[in-house]
């Protein structure tokens, strides 16, 4: 039986605003999510036994049932038990290029690739909205990772409104290899400090979301105006992560001084990115930052913004 090879892109946040609490315990968010060309490669190979195995050589990626790719495969087995019995178990190999616990949705995009791959392999025929609905049971970022591109995300981040693609821009990304920020910690710390600013009634929440739809950042995206987008990048979680992690704050300052259209921490961090007009500008900033922070623990990447989510290679 055929194996499937898939490309699973990372995401960055051009915007992340925390609006309030939800009855389900999650935060009410409004975000602008953007796929980039930095991507994991996922290979899904069927086998006769019914079990699921995960292979990955990255030391920080779990190979057990806590791996999001494993959980995605398990979810498909549970929902489509007849297909599972007919086609057998799965070997999932993850070639990890996206840094782990970095605010780039690395685990989520692997899970998205597994959902898309199994849908093909078992010839289930789920549509993208059906796949997204399954994906939202596993994690808030996974529906976005399936379709990718540029989207306004609300709710927990799973309600998506795709907007104009921005694939003409580039980013330089920087992350300290040994530094990881826990996403639950970042949101809890934010709640502790800013609870008094949370909105609770539905009308105020709707108003706040519609403000983002008509914000200068969204206008900049619609106009494909890199200068405007760079100027209005925003992430509420910087307010708790940067004071706690001095290295990240310093990296952001250094990257900002090196030029580009704007600099921001992605998601709950600790990855910081600078938006750039061209690959040449991104390469220049990459060289400048490398020269200014000569720490072997710091890794820098150049990537292009991407209009695609999960893609099947074969
Ligand atoms: P997000 O931006 O969605 O919050 P992240 O980029 O900050 O995610 P991940 O790279 O998904 O974080 O990793 C978070 C944790 O999830 C890791 O510490 C790791 O132990 C666990 N994990 C489970 N499955 C995977 C996977 N397939 N790839 C990477 N990490 C995984």
Image (spheres, helix red, strand yellow):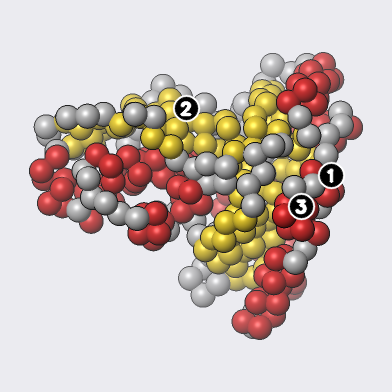
Q: Nearer the viewer, mark 1 or mark 3?
A: 3
* Mark 3 surroundings: few (<14), some (14-19) or many (≥20) residues within 10 A: few
Is residue 239 in view from this perspective?
Answer: no
Tell me how far mark 1 sits from mark 3, CA to CA: 10 Å
Q: Quadrant of the C terminus?
A: top left
Q: Quadrant of the N terminus?
A: top left
Helix, strand or loop at label 3? It is loop
Position of residue 230 relative to residue 296, above or below, is below
Whether the residue under disc 2 has CB within 8 Å of ligand 1: yes
Position of residue 21 relative to residue 58, above or below, is below
Q: Earlier in the sequence, mark 3 or mark 2?
A: 2
- Please name whichever residue, 64 or 70, is drawn nearer the observer in this view of the structure: 70
Horizontal side of 57 relative to 76 (left or right) equals right
Q: Position of residue 304 (x, y in %)?
A: 65, 32
Horizontal side of 112 relative to 256 (left or right) equals left
Q: Which residue is mark 3?
A: 223
Q: Which residue is mark 1?
A: 227
Helix, strand or loop at label 1? It is helix
Whether the residue under disc 1 has CB within 8 Å of ligand 1: no
Seen at 28% across and 46% down, the residue is 119
Q: Earlier in the sequence, mark 1 or mark 2?
A: 2
Tell me how far mark 3 sits from mark 2, CA to CA: 34 Å
* Mark 2 surroundings: few (<14), some (14-19) or many (≥20) residues within 10 A: some
Q: Position of residue 113 (x, y in %)?
A: 39, 40
Q: Which residue is mark 2?
A: 96
Q: Residue furthest front?
A: 223
| Quadrant of the rendered image containing residue 62 | top left
Q: Are marks 3 and 2 in contact (CB under 8 Å)?
A: no
């Amino acid at each position: 039986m055929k194996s499937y090879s898939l490309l699973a892109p990372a995401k960055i946040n051009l915007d992340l605003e925390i609006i309030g609490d939800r009855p389900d315990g999650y935060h009410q968010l409004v975000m602008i999510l953007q796929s980039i060309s930095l991507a994991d490669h996922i290979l899904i190979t069927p086998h006769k036994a019914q079990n699921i195995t995960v292979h990955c050589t990255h030391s920080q990626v779990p190979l057990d049932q806590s791996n999001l790719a494993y959980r995605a495969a398990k979810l498909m087995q549970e929902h489509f038990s007849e297909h599972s019995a007919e086609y057998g178990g799965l070997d999932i190999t993850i070639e990890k290029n996206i840094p782990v616990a970095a605010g780039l949705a690395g685990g989520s995009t692997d899970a998205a690739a597994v959902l898309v791959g199994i849908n093909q392999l078992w010839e289930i025929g789920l549509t993208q909205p059906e796949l997204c609905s399954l994906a939202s049971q596993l994690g808030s970022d996974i529906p976005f990772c399936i379709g990718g591109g540029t989207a306004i995300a609300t709710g927990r981040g799973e309600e998506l409104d795709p907007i104009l693609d921005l694939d003409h821009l580039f980013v330089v990304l920087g992350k300290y290899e040994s530094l990881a920020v826990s996403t639950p910690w970042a949101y809890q710390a934010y709640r502790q400090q800013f609870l008094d600013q949370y909105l609770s009634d539905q009308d105020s929440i709707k108003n706040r979301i519609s403000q983002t739809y008509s914000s200068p950042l969204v206008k900049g995206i619609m106009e494909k105006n890199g200068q405007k987008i760079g100027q209005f990048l925003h992430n509420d979680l910087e307010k708790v992560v940067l004071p706690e992690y001095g290295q990240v704050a310093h990296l952001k300052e250094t990257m900002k001084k090196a030029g580009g259209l704007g600099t921001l921490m992605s998601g709950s961090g600790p990855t910081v990115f600078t938006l750039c007009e061209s690959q040449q500008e991104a390469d220049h900033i990459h060289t400048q930052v490398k020269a200014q922070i000569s720490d072997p623990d710091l890794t820098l990447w150049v990537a292009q913004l991407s209009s695609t989510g999960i893609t099947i290679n074969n």
